[in-house]
Image (cartoon, helix red, strand yellow):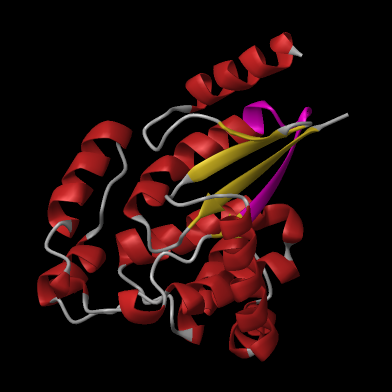
Amino acid sequence: MAVKLTYVFDAYCGWCYGFGPAVRDFAAANAGRIELDVVSGGLFTGARVAPIGTMPYVAGANARIAELTGVEFGLGYSDLVADGRFQMDSTAAGAGFAALRRVAPERALASAEAMQRAFYFVGLSLSEASTYRHVADQLGLDAAEVAAGFVSPDSRVAAVHDFTRAARLGVTSYPTLLLHTDTGVVRLGGPAANAIQLTNALDRYLVSQ
């Protein structure tokens, strides 16, 4: 029987962008023995939705993320940071992810990664339907269906449901990869962990059972 895991990410989380390749490779390497659910975390909601220029830590954090994980931040995104006016809204991003997940539930992890690349590399807003057309095209999905799903109220409801689920799991930071056990959830790795380290952590748990 497959081991159940939940990956809680936020599309507007730089550390999640850095962690994306690791969790993708981990999921691929362990495809035969894990069942992975992907959930939006809700990092920037309510009063936390503010211009990126009001977050002076962003540039330093991005440099650290790139150093530790090897991901590249694109010029399009760098322009948004330099301009400072862009607002990261996790509810909109969560709705977009919900729309992608509804169309292709088996490709939720790929959808999460494609959304993050659209923002952190290309510099596209995750609050625009056109961005989800772009992401859908990248994934070979029906762009019109995904874009329509993004503007549907159902996707906003699904995003809030994700946020609530993440909170109930005790998630307070992103990214978080959780292993479900008979006695609760166990966090696997940290934001700078690579796929091999994540697999080793899973192996240690399975051997101990």
Residue at 54 percent across and 57 percent down: it is 112
Residue 135 magenta-highlighted: no
Q: Quadrant of residue 138?
A: bottom right
**Residue at x 70% of width, y 84% of height:** 154
Which residue lies at the image location 42% right of the left edge and 41% below the top edge?
19
Q: Is residue 30 magenta?
A: yes
* Near-viewer residue (176 or 149): 176
Q: In the picture shown, does residue 134 fall above or below 154?
A: above
Position above or below: 147 against 80: below
Judge whether 153 appears above or below 171 on screen.
below
Compared to 111, does 136 lie above or below?
below
User: Which quadrant holds residue 71?
Assistant: top left
Q: Position of residue 8 (x, y in %)?
A: 55, 51
Span highlighted in magenta in the image: 28-38
Q: Which residue is outermost to the front? A: 183
In the image, residue 92 lies at what x, y percent?
49, 79
